[in-house]
Amino acid sequence: MLKNILVPYDGSPLSKKALELAKDISRNFNASLDLLLVVPDYYPISDSLFSGVASTNYQKVVKTLKDKGEKEMQSVTEKCRQDGSKATYKIVHDDISNAILQEAKKSKVDLIIMGSRRMTGIASLKRFGSTARHVAEHATCPVTIVH
């Protein structure tokens, strides 16, 4: 039985499509939706090279992304609730794949539903896998990938 569904959400068309599927499933199983926005963790150039400029700008970018994400996630979560789903959200700043896997484990989710771009050419080789592929291979619960 499904009780908890995790939806990594970034506002992209595919994450919106994944959310729509998750809302349908959550209503059918009376499951809660946990929306997760991950602000990607990048490593700026050492601030010793530019007297703190790179680090300062990086922190501003992260803050801007979190602030913008907060507004979007509040709106999306409220819409989910209006549509009849029990929904909450969380924003984290980390590596995307690891954040999804950690949140799934921590929250003991029963299902992850996420979007994924179709990869072509050399990128489609397993060793150049996507975030969705990494999550699907390492998650301890089922993962539904929406294209």
Image (cartoon, grey):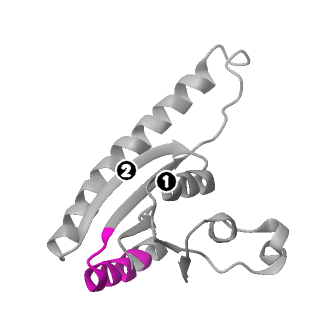
**Residue under numbered circle 2:** 90
**Residue under numbered circle 1:** 103
Contact? badges 1 and 2 (CB < 8 Å) = yes
Residue 5 horizontal side relative to residue 130, left or right: left
Q: CA distance from mark 1 to mark 2?
A: 9 Å
Q: Is residue 38 magenta?
A: no
Position of 53 relative to 107 (above/below): above
Location of the C terminus (image quadrant): bottom right
Residue 38 horizontal side relative to residue 47, left or right: left
User: Where does residue 34 sit, x and y in percent of width and height?
Assistant: 36, 61
Location of the N terminus (image quadrant): bottom left
Please name the amino acid that badge 1 sits on. Glu
Position of 102 relative to 63 (above/below): below
Q: Along the line of sight, which residue is nearer the eye, 87 or 53?
A: 87
- As drawn, the label of residue 72 is none
User: Where does residue 46 sit, x and y in percent of width and height?
Assistant: 71, 23
Residue 89 found in image quarter: bottom left
Where are the magenta residues, as a range? Answer: 18-32
Please name the amino acid that badge 2 sits on. Lys
Mainly helix, strand or loop, the magenta region? helix
User: Where does residue 4 sit, x and y in percent of width and height?
Assistant: 37, 68
Position of 99 relative to 41 (above/below): below
Q: Kindly identify the residue that appears in the image at 82 percent across and 73 percent down.
A: 126
Q: Along the line of sight, which residue is nearer the eye, 59 or 125?
A: 125
Residue 122 horizontal side relative to residue 57, left or right: right
Q: Kindly identify the residue that appears in the image at 46 percent across and 60 percent down.
A: 108
